[in-house]
Image (spheres, rainbow, N blue to C red):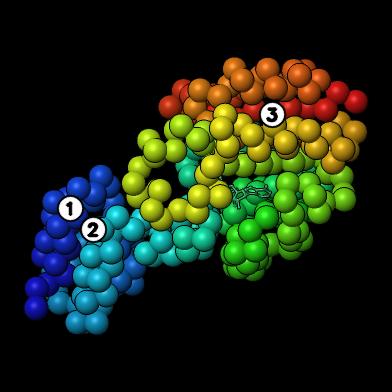
C-alpha cells in the first residue's frame, strides 16, 4: 500500500483531472476527514501507511467528489463564520458571502433582543448571531422540515437555546421581533441554467429559486415584515448580484426609507439593512 502522502498526491491529481475547480482544497478536506487528521496538519508529514479502512474511505470520498458531489456534503460539514455546521444536501451549504449578514447584524445585538432567522436552512446565520451574544432570544424558521431538523441538530451541537418554527414565510409566525435576518432564495428563473452543474445537481432547488425576477420571495417578505417588527425593529436581507436597484425600488415602494446597502468581499452589493420608521 502507498504511504499516506503519496496516496494524497495521487488522489489530488485524480480530482484535478476530473475537472474539480478546488481539487487541492477538496483533497485536503477529504484526507483530513478520512484519516481523522486535523486539517491544519499537512499531508506532507504523513509518510507512513495509514490503515487500509481509512485509505479505502478516502478513495471512496474522492470518487464521489470526482463526479461532482460537493466536498461539504461528503464530509457532512461546512465552516461558516466561527463554527462548523452539519450539512447533508437537504439544505443549502452555507456560503461565505452570507457571513456579511453576521458582520452587519452582530453590531445590532443587545441582551434580550428577539431575533428571527427566516429561511434558516442549516441555521448558520441565526446560530452564528447567537454565538456572538447568547443573551438574545433566537427563533429559527423555515418551510422545509428537513432544514428545521438539521438546524435543530446544529443548535444542539452549538449548545444554543432557541425556538423552531415551521412556516411558509410569516404564515405561522405570530410574534414580533427586534431583528429579522433572512437569506431567502433569490436566483431568477433565467439565471438558473447558469448555476454550476454541481449546485443544480446537489443542492435543494427550493433553497435557490427566487421566481421569475429572483426577488419574488423577497417581495412577499417585504409585504409581511412590518407586522412582525417591534418599534425600531430592523431587518437584514441578503440578495443576489445585480438585484440592488430593483430591491431599492421595492423597499421604497414598501415605504422603507432608512436603508443601508453593504458590499461583499467581491465589491458586489449583497446585503441591505433596513430600519423600521416608527
Ligand atoms: C438560500 S437558503 C438559505 C439558508 C441559510 N439561511 C443560509 O444562509 O445558508 C433559503 C432557505 O429558505 C427556505 N425557504 C424557501 N422558501 C421559503 C418560504 N416560503 N418560507 C420559509 N422558508 C423558505 C429554504 O428552505 C432554505 O432553507
Q: Are marks 1 and 3 in contact (CB under 8 Å)?
A: no
Position above or below: 255 against 234: above
Q: Is residue 11 left or right of residue 42?
A: left
Q: Locate the N terminus by quadrant.
A: bottom left
Residue at 70% in and 47% down: 118
N-terminal label among 2 and 1: 1
Residue at 75% in and 32% down: 222
Q: Is residue 181 left or right of residue 81?
A: right
Q: Locate the C terminus by quadrant.
A: top right
Residue 66, disc: 2
Q: Quadrant of residue 262?
A: top right
Q: Provide the residue designation for mark 1.
A: 18
Q: Element type at marker 3?
A: strand
Q: Provide the residue designation for mark 3.
A: 273
Q: Is residue 247 left or right of residue 33?
A: right
Q: Are marks 2 and 1 in contact (CB under 8 Å)?
A: yes
What is the spatial separation of the Cα atoms under label 3 and label 2, in whole angstroms?
40 Å
Position above or below: 171 against 228: below
Q: Residues within 10 Å of mark 2 (few under 14, many from 20)?
A: many
| Front residue (pair 20, 79) | 20
Position above or below: 173 against 53: above
Q: Residues within 10 Å of mark 1 (few under 14, many from 20)?
A: some
Q: Is residue 80 visible?
A: no
Residue at 55% in and 48% down: 207
Q: Position of residue 249 (x, y in %)?
A: 68, 17
Q: Position of residue 240 (x, y in %)?
A: 53, 31
Amino acid at each position: 500500500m502507498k504511504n499516506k502522502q503519496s496516496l494524497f498526491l495521487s488522489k489530488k491529481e485524480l480530482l484535478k483531472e476530473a475537472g474539480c475547480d478546488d481539487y487541492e482544497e477538496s483533497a485536503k478536506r477529504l484526507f483530513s476527514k478520512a484519516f481523522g487528521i486535523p486539517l491544519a496538519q499537512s499531508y506532507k508529514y504523513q509518510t507512513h501507511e495509514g490503515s487500509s479502512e481509512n485509505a479505502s474511505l478516502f478513495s471512496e470520498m474522492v470518487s464521489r467528489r470526482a463526479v461532482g458531489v460537493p466536498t461539504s456534503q461528503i464530509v457532512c460539514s461546512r465552516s461558516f463564520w466561527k463554527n462548523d455546521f452539519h450539512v447533508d444536501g437537504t439544505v443549502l451549504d452555507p456560503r461565505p458571502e452570507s457571513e456579511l449578514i453576521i458582520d452587519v447584524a452582530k453590531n445590532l445585538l443587545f441582551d434580550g433582543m428577539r431575533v428571527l432567522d427566516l429561511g434558516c436552512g442549516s441555521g448558520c446565520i441565526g446560530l452564528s448571531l447567537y454565538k456572538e451574544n447568547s443573551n438574545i432570544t433566537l427563533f429559527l424558521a423555515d418551510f422545509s422540515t428537513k432544514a428545521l431538523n438539521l438546524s435543530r441538530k446544529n443548535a444542539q451541537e452549538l449548545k444554543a437555546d432557541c425556538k423552531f418554527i415551521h412556516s411558509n414565510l410569516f404564515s405561522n409566525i405570530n410574534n414580533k421581533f427586534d431583528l429579522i435576518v433572512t437569506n431567502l432564495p433569490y436566483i431568477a428563473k433565467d439565471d438558473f441554467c447558469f448555476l454550476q452543474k454541481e449546485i443544480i445537481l446537489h443542492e435543494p432547488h427550493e433553497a435557490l429559486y427566487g421566481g421569475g425576477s429572483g426577488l419574488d420571495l423577497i417581495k412577499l417578505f417585504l409585504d409581511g415584515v412590518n407586522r412582525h417588527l417591534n418599534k425600531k425593529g430592523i431587518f437584514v436581507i441578503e440578495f443576489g448580484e445585480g438585484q440592488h436597484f430593483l430591491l431599492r425600488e421595492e423597499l421604497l415602494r414598501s415605504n422603507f426609507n432608512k436603508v443601508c446597502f453593504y458590499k461583499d468581499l467581491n465589491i458586489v452589493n449583497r446585503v441591505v439593512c433596513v430600519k423600521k420608521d416608527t
